[in-house]
Image (cartoon, rainbow, N blue to C red):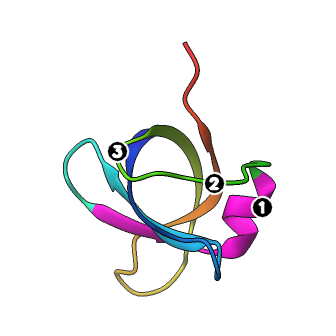
Amino acid sequence: MQATAYTYDPESRSGQVLLDDGTPVPFDAAAFDAGGLRLLRPGQRVRVETAADGGAGAGPRITLVTLQTF
């Protein structure tokens, strides 16, 4: 799935992406590290992989963040 980087904190290596429908979805350091990235800037197009969170109405959980390539 594609998204746009919205926020990123380099100290915690976590942040949020905006899905194409405008929904913000947080990601944690594990998802950031899985993509092998070193830095993420707001506005960059990214590819994310998700897993069902299982929480009541919590929505998807991002498991991987990587740069979108064409």
Q: Pointers 1 and 3 in contact (CB under 8 A)? A: no
Give the numbered dot on residue 39: 2
What is the C-alpha distance between the residues marked 2 and 3?
A: 12 Å
Q: Earlier in the sequence, mark 2 or mark 1?
A: 1
Magenta-span inclusion, residue 33: yes
- Give the vertical position of 44 relative to 8 (above or below): above
Determine which residue is flagged by label 3: 43
What label sits on residue 68 in the rendered view? none
CA–CA distance in space, label 1 to label 3 = 19 Å
User: Alpha-carbon distance for marks 2 and 1?
Assistant: 10 Å
Against 9, residue 24 (above or below) is: above
Name the residue that disc number 1 marks: 33
Residue 33, given in percent of the width and then of the height, sits at: 77, 61
Q: Which segment is the magenta one?
A: 24-34
- Closest to the camera, between mark 1 and mark 3, is 3
Amino acid type assigned to the residue bearing label 3 in the image: Gly
Mark 2 element type? loop
Density class for disc 3 (Cα within 10 Å; few <14, some 14-19, many ≥20) is few
Determine whether the residue tagged by mark 3 lies in a helix, strand or loop. loop
Q: In the figure, is residue 16 to the left or right of 22?
A: right
Q: Amino acid at mark 2?
A: Leu
Q: Is residue 22 left or right of residue 18?
A: left
The stretch drawn in magenta includes residue 36: no
